[in-house]
Image (tube, rainbow, N blue to C red):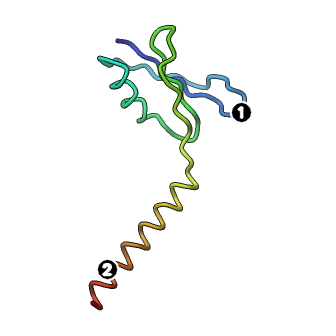
Amino acid sequence: MHYRVYVMNAKSGHIEGVEELDAPDDGSALNESFAFRGERPLELWCETRKVARIEARDLTQELLERRRWERALLEAERDVRTG
């Protein structure tokens, strides 16, 4: 089946770009559309049917989470060395 992933403007709701993809079903298309996920929301459509809306990534939250994981790993490594 043929799908379109629309890159949306978060404030105005206007379409800023489009990516085309072919997938056997909605679930596969949804999984593939995550590759386009960034700082703007996406809408996945199949013909005239809206399949899903994918919210924009919260890059600040992802950075904070990554830093927490890095700190936890460093502490674990330190504990192993001093343990």
Residue 38 or 44: which is nearer the viewer?
Answer: 44
Please tell me how crowded label 1 is: few (under 14), some (14-19), or many (20+) other residues with Cα within 10 Å: few
Count the marks: how many? 2
Question: SS of the residue at dot 1?
Answer: loop
Quarter containing the C terminus: bottom left
Q: Can you say whether 67 is above or below 32 in the image? A: below
Q: Quadrant of residue 7?
A: top right
Q: Amino acid at mark 2?
A: Glu
Please tell me how crowded label 2 is: few (under 14), some (14-19), or many (20+) other residues with Cα within 10 Å: few
Residue designated by label 2 = 77
Residue drawn 54% across and 44% down?
57
Quarter containing the N terminus: top left
Q: Residue furthest right?
A: 12
Residue drawn 37% across and 24% down?
29
Q: Quadrant of residue 81?
A: bottom left
Residue 82 or 7: which is nearer the viewer?
Answer: 82
Q: Can you say whether 55 is above or below 50 in the image? A: below
Q: Can you say whether 22 is above or below 12 in the image? A: above
Mark drawn on residue 66: none
Q: Amino acid at mark 1?
A: Lys
Residue drawn 71% across and 33% down?
11
16 horizontally vs 24: left or right:
right
33 horizontally vs 9: left or right:
left
- Say which label, 2 or 1, has the lower sequence index: 1
- Image coords of residue 2 (percent x, y): 38, 12
Q: CA distance from mark 2 to mark 1?
A: 44 Å
Question: SS of the residue at dot 2?
Answer: helix
Residue designated by label 1 = 11
